[in-house]
Image (cartoon, grey):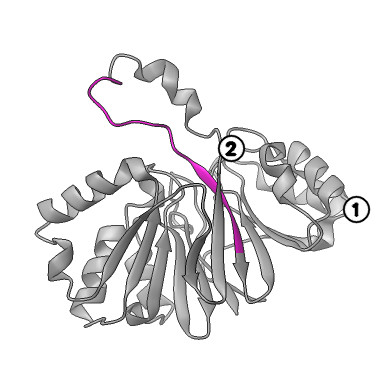
Amino acid sequence: MKLMFLGTASGLPTHDRFSQTVVLEIDKTLHLIDVGDAASSLLAQSKLNHQSIRSIVVSHMHADHHAGLAQVLKTSMHLKKDSDLKIVLPSEGINAVVGFLEACYLPLEWLKYPVEMIPIGDEEIVIRDNLTMNAYPNTHLLGLKGRSFRRLDEMNWQFQSYSFVINAQGRRIVYSGNLRGKLAEIDELIDQNTILITEMAHLRIDEMLDVISQRKPKHVYITHFYPYLDMDDVKQKITDSSFGEAITLTWDGMVVEL
């Protein structure tokens, strides 16, 4: 089983980081966790077969986490994918995604492979026998409520944003998604058996290290880097911490054997 960090930027891509795209490979099947705008090209660049994609998870409806979805679906069609695909996403986004695909002359029935849209809810989501996930709401989008009151009557906004506990071949992976300033928001999901994938765009390294020192996850992979982050400061604080050896700052194209 492999973790592949194809894109590690925040909502602001840079010359050396594309928007967030994470891939979990299990028994030659691919499972995408958020699909940034370059996802299809990054898959091709990494020589990953679109036909092997069996699931795509979207943590929330900010564009940098799903802007690559339509092209991944279209490329998969052109490459004659025939295996089924599960797309797991916030319920508030399903009609919008289906409508956008139709506006792109790409209705689901034209893809010629089975697609199941699964709204995120309270129940465990079974992707396959050895891959399940549970979603946990986080507060990432709630800060937008104050700006949104004049549009709530006309929009379908429900401010749905999620973190995930993924159980894959006996391993426990926690994917934070985007949070609202504190890793402590999901600290109860983290234990000593956890492989933690967390973001850096909205979190402070000091608070993050405090949570990590208390929960002691097996390993931490940090991604989703804001371009104006002081990376030297982040690296130094990780080096100075007692948990530094268990923390990895990811980069585009990084592959981890689990």
Mark 1: amino acid: Ser
Residue at numbered disc 1: 242
Q: Is residue 111 visible?
A: yes
Q: Which residue is mark 2?
A: 202
Q: Secondary structure at mark 1?
A: loop
The residue carrying pointer 2 sits among few (fewer than 14), some (14 to 19) or many (20 or more) residues within 10 Å by Cα, namely: some
Instruction: Give the magenta range.
Output: 152-166
Q: Is residue 182 magenta?
A: no
Quadrant of residue 44 within the rendered picture: bottom left
Residue placed most toward the observer, 10 or 34: 34
Q: Are marks 1 and 2 in contact (CB under 8 Å)?
A: no
Which amino acid, by three-letter code, is at mark 2? His
Q: Overall secondary structure of the magenta stretch?
A: loop
The quarter of the image holding the N terminus is bottom right
Residue furthest to the front in view is 123
Q: Quadrant of the C terminus?
A: bottom right
Q: Earlier in the sequence, mark 1 or mark 2?
A: 2
